[in-house]
Image: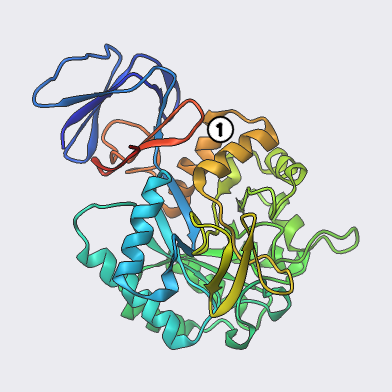
């Protein structure tokens, strides 16, 4: 598709442009024209929006288990396809399909399903799967969260290599507890192979976390949640992540996982450069209250909050537009800064910022049009309109 978008404020890497025209062809951003031409140019259809709308980069979510009744662990092309399309309707143009702690063969099946989906689905219908976030099974039983304790394993390089070989190396990010036996060796292996090592579901002490950072850990999964917290005599993994310039922190900004004041604190300490907004969404997302499955466990969703029977938080029903609105409301940051934490920063973490994650010449046309209330009106993935609000 070849088209030109005119009308909305355009949020580029460095500036906010008014009266700009964005030309898209062959899946790429071909020009950012300040003349805002209204006519059809060279076979380009003009798509016009009101001037109080926003054209922003597509959101990139590094932590998605499921949505709209489907889950990565379903390990089916239908589930992944429905997730892709539903996420696109929420403005997400790329995501990491996130697994759970489960039986080895169940994780393997999910990895192979993602591999096949990424390889075989060339027609763009929704958000692109950018790889897998392996959350578990290499986690602490002391910080299990909503994961399955009976399936926890210690870090195992041989098993991980088998999974990577069978899945064509789809795993891009691994959440693990570095304090476990062989944890530091595993982190060194991940760093050597350019895979993101993340501390999460961990009871690591402050000192153990600093060692993990020195070995190559660069990410903290859902900071504060399912990890050793702050104590004045044992600062824990949380404080190590907050103070390290090497660590980018993932936040679930739903008002449940983190108090607004904590979000403010994290932004002040980490700055907009080292914060990444993610959803940790589970299959109830975009659906109503009820009972749902997460990793073989029943999850009750009431008023949008997902918990296990005893009250443990079990993922979220958060969407990226809601996360961005909450971030702005909790911290008073600008839309420009909030977008950076949902687009540019996750793209940089994955090492793909040279081709996506912002509106710039030559990059993939992964674009989202938001209305004046920051609701998604249109989503464009690699130059194809995959969602348009009716």
Q: Quadrant of the N terminus?
A: top left
Examine the rendering and report whether any part of residue 37 can be seen: yes
Compared across the picture, whether 301 is left or right of 31 comes to: right
Q: Position of residue 225 (x, y in %)?
A: 69, 61
Q: Position of residue 28 (x, y in %)?
A: 23, 37
Q: Circle 1 sits on which residue? A: 337
Identify whether 282 is placed above or below 330. Answer: below
Compared across the picture, whether 153 is left or right of 209 comes to: left
Compared across the picture, whether 338 is left or right of 369 comes to: right
Residue closer to the observer: 328 or 316: 316
Identify whether 53 is placed above or below 352. Answer: above
Residue closer to the observer: 86 or 27: 86
The residue drawn where x is 39% and y is 41% is: 58
The residue drawn where x is 69% and y is 74% is: 309
Q: Quadrant of the C terminus?
A: top left
The residue drawn where x is 68% and y is 40% is: 267
In which image quadrant can residue 322 be found?
Answer: top right
Identify whether 174 is placed above or below 50. Answer: below
The residue drawn where x is 77% and y is 42% is: 261
In which image quadrant can residue 195 be found?
Answer: bottom left
């Amino acid at each position: 598709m070849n088209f030109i978008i005119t009308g909305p404020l355009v949020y580029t890497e460095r500036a906010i442009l008014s009266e700009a025209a964005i030309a898209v062809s062959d899946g790429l951003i071909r020009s950012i024209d300040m003349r805002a031409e209204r006519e059809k140019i060279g076979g380009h259809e003009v798509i016009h929006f009101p001037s109080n709308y926003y054209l922003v980069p597509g959101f990139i979510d590094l932590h998605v288990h499921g949505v709209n009744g489907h889950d990565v662990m379903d390990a089916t092309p239908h589930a992944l396809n429905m997730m892709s399309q539903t996420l696109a309707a929420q403005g997400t143009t790329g995501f990491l399909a996130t697994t759970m702690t489960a039986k080895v063969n169940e994780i393997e099946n999910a990895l192979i399903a993602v591999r096949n989906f990424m390889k075989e689905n060339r027609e763009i219908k929704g958000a692109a799967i950018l790889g897998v976030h392996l959350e578990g099974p290499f986690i602490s039983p002391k910080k299990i969260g909503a994961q399955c304790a009976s399936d926890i394993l210690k870090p195992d390089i041989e098993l991980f290599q088998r999974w990577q070989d069978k899945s064509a190396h789809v795993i891009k990010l691994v959440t693990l507890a570095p304090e476990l036996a062989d944890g530091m060796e595993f982190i060194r292996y991940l760093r050597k192979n350019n895979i993101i090592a993340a501390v999460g579901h961990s009871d690591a002490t402050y000192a153990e976390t600093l060692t993990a950072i020195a070995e190559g850990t660069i990410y903290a999964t859902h900071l504060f949640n399912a990890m050793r917290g702050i104590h004045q005599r044992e600062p824990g993994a949380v404080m190590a992540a907050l103070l390290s310039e090497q660590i980018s922190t993932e936040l679930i900004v739903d008002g449940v996982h983190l108090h607004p004041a904590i979000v403010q604190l994290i932004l002040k300490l980490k700055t907009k450069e080292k914060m990444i907004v993610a959803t940790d969404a589970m299959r109830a997302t975009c659906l109503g209250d009820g009972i749902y499955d997460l990793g073989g466990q029943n999850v009750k969703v009431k008023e949008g909050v997902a918990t296990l029977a005893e009250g443990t938080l079990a993922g979220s029903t958060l969407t990226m537009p809601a996360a961005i609105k909450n971030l702005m409301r909790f911290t008073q940051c600008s839309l420009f800064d909030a977008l950076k934490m949902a687009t540019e920063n996750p793209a940089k973490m994955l090492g793909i910022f040279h081709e996506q994650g912002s509106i710039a010449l030559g990059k993939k046309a992964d674009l989202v049009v938001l209305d004046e209330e920051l609701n998604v009106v249109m989503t464009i993935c690699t130059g194809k309109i995959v969602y348009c609000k009716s």
